[in-house]
Image (tube, helix red, strand yellow):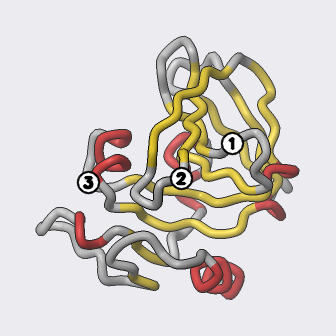
Amino acid sequence: MSDSLFGSCQCGEVTYELDRAAVLTLYRCHCRECQKQAAGAFGVSLKARRDGFRILRGELGTWERATDSGKRSVANFCRGCGCRIFHGAASSEIVSLKAGLLDEIAELWPVGNIWTDSALPWIDATDGIVYARQPPSYDALIEAYRRQP
C-alpha cells in the first residue's frame, strides 16, 4: 500500500496527493450545503493536516460563504469543471477534502455523521459518532478514526 492517496477533480485538470499519515478523520456530513455539493444525500468529508496535502497540477479558484457560526468557509475548486476540491483558508493548518474525489475511496471508512438533523429520512445516519449539528470539536471523530484497524 502506498504512503499517499491521490485524487482529482471531475475533469482531471486538478490533481492532488495526500499523505496517509496526514489524514485525521473521515465522516459523512448531512448539511444542506454538502447535499447540494454532492448532488446527493450527504457529503463525505476528510479532515487532514495541510502540510500533508499537495496540489500536483492545475489551478484553484476560491469562493467564500458565511457559516452558521458566523465564520467564513473558503471553498477551493477547479476553475475548469467547478468541482470543489477542499475547504480551508490559506492560513488554516487543517483542510477538509471532498473525499469522493479520491482515487481509492473504497478503502477508507467513515467513523460518524454530522448535521444529522438535516439527514434525509431514508438515510440511516445513526452509525458511529453522531452529531445533530456542527460538532463542538472534531476530537471524538479524530480519535475514532485513529482507533480503526
Q: Position of residue 7 (x, y in %)?
A: 65, 38
Disc on the earlier residue, 3 or 1: 3
Question: Left or right: where does residue 135 sit relative to residue 97?
Answer: left
- Of residues 8 and 133, the one drawn nearer to the viewer in this rendering: 133
Q: Secondary structure at mark 2?
A: loop
Q: Nearer the viewer, residue 110 or 120?
A: 120
At 71% across and 81% down in the image, what residue appears?
146
Residue closest to the far top: 80
The percent position of residue 63, horizontal first and vertical second, equals: 53, 28
Which residue is farthest front?
A: 70
> Is disc 3 in contact with disc 1, using a CB cutoff of under 8 Å?
no
Query: On residue 71, which mark appears?
Result: 2
70 versus 127 height, above or below: above
| Mark 1 Cα shell of 10 Å, populated few (<14), some (14-19), many (≥20) | some
Could you say which disc has been placed on residue 41 in the image? 3
Q: Residues within 10 Å of mark 2 (few under 14, many from 20)?
A: few
Q: Position of residue 15 (x, y in %)?
A: 70, 28
CA distance separating discs 2 and 1: 11 Å
Identify which amino acid the numbered label 3 is placed on. Ala
Q: Quadrant of the N terminus?
A: bottom right
Return the mark for residue 18: none
Q: Secondary structure at mark 3?
A: loop
Q: Residue at x 69, y 42 (%)?
A: 89
Q: Nearer the viewer, mark 3 or mark 1?
A: 1
Q: Quadrant of residue 13?
A: top right
**Residue for badge 1:** 89
Residue density around tag 3, few if under 14, some if 14–19, many if 20 or more, within 10 Å: many
CA–CA distance between discs 3 and 1?
Answer: 26 Å
Q: Quadrant of residue 101?
A: top right
